[in-house]
Amino acid sequence: MRLKHVRAEAWASLHRLARNRLALSLVLVVPLTFFAAVLITTPRRPTTVELASVPEEEMVMPPRVPIHPGPRGAVLDASERSLSAVFIAVAAVGAVAALLALDLAQKDAAATRRLVLSGQQPAEILAGRFAALTCVVMAATACVAAALPLLVRAERFGLMVVGLCLGALVHAAYGLLVGAIFRRDLVGILLVVLLVNLDAGWLQNPLYYAGAQHRVVIRALPAHGPAQVALVAAFGDYPVGHAALLGLGYAVLLLAAAAVVFTLRIRVARGSRRFGH
Amino acid sequence: MRTPERLQTTQPLLEARGISFAFLRRTVLRGASLSVAGGTITGVVGENGSGKTTLLRILAGLTAPDVGEVNVVGRIGYCPQDTELFQLLTVREHLRLFASALEIPAWEAEAEQLATRLALRPYLDTLVRNASGGTRQKLNLALALLGDPDVLLLDEPYAAFDWQTYEAFWELAAELRKRGKAVLLVSHLVHDRKRVDQLWELSDGVIRCA
């Protein structure tokens, strides 16, 4: 992989993203809509939830917010609104990142293939696009993080933002993968909305998790690591290393899968070649 | 057909042998073979849907045939029939991006030269999305010419050109021929026939020397 080529693609992708007004409007519209939904529908009443990634043996007393051992791990008392605000923030940045990535991957596919014909390697294109997406989704995450103190007083604000960033990266990689597999806008958008809605927007909700069954399914989903980093950092002092690694692992795995599919879909034959012999 | 003084190489720069291709149970190409020598302009004609574009895509390496062999000497420049461009990049940004892919060190000079030849200069900072059909077509061609390829595959490159640009295109093609390049051009225009050195006709998936 040639760094110069990655830089050229990242630069072009940044320009394409910055000029896509519809996609950029999502950066504001999606988080605002999600936060508005939390503000309107979620009460401030205290509730008890379980922190999925904090087992009982790792608990440190006394915590800054009321946390006590539960039958399966750490149990946390916090307001429904503040809990919802944190998990919905992960869903918001995830949705934005996945949709931007999908748009970048699906649009102008023929021109991208032509670029490969000119000598650019598919891996360089994907790396450049991921770099450009990282810049844009980090900016989006910063906007979301700036709005969060209005809804929640985070214990470890910086680490909570790291959770949001992880969520954005995991979903950006997912968007690139979906865009590499499916050429049609509608199918891609449906798959992005489906995952973000089911995973980050529903199953990772700590209010839901407390009463869920077959939790292993919830813990195996891509948004679990990032959501746990953000939640644990926002409401306690517990270690987040395992959850962060899980999120990073998912980002790497999805990006690698996107690279394989993208390379197979976009490869061209150069020089002399024989077929069917 | 004409044979002006030019650098014609005996060795074909592009050669296809026994190319067969079927799509959705329809045979598009049946054992198509052709060769294009350096210093020549070769035309491929045929009715709509006769497989001209498929043949060019196979030669360019964008489509894999079911059977066949393609031999290429040097690098291919490919100008597709549809303008395959990035809608949200400007003309200049396209030239820069593709020059980077081709590893052209002094890309600005070459891009300027191409922009002048193809009358693209006033539109260098225009987004492709906002450009006219003719400007897109010119950029489409400019990207194929970038990096001075040895073999040029042009799929109806002038469909949206005005007369002046059309004439400028043929001057450019004649210049490329003089410099020993192999130019393969798909066209359905009858009056282009006299401008090429060799003409192939595609009909019912079979290619014949016309």
Image (cartoon, rainbow, N blue to C red):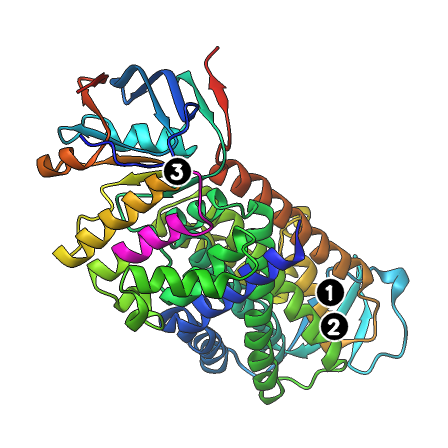
Circle 1 packing at 10 Å, graded few (<14), some (14-19), many (20+), is many
Amino acid on which disc 3 is placed: Lys
Which mark is on residue A76?
A: 2
Tell me where the magenta segment starts and ends, as one range: B137-151
* CB-based contact (under 8 Å), mark 1 and mark 2: yes
Marks 1 and 3 on same chain: no
Q: Chain of mark 2?
A: A
Q: Is residue B143 magenta?
A: yes
Marks 1 and 2 on same chain: yes
> Judging from the image, what secondary structure is the residue with disc 1 in?
loop
Q: Taken as a whole, is the magenta stretch helix, strand or loop? A: helix
Quarter of the figure with residue A182 = top left
**Residue shown at 21% from the left, 48% from the top:** B158
Separation of marks 1 and 3 at Cα, in angstroms: 68 Å
Q: Which residue is mark 3?
A: B181
x, y percent for residue A248: 71, 57
- Foreground residue among B102 and A242: B102
**Residue shown at 35% from the left, 26% from the top:** B36
> Judging from the image, what secondary structure is the residue with disc 2 in?
strand
Q: Residue furthest front?
A: B5
Is residue A178 positioned above or below B129 on the image? above
x, y percent for residue B10: 41, 23
**Residue shown at 80% from the left, 65% from the top:** A240
Circle 2 packing at 10 Å, graded few (<14), some (14-19), many (20+), is many
Is residue A65 positioned above or below A130 on the image? below
Q: Chain of mark 3?
A: B
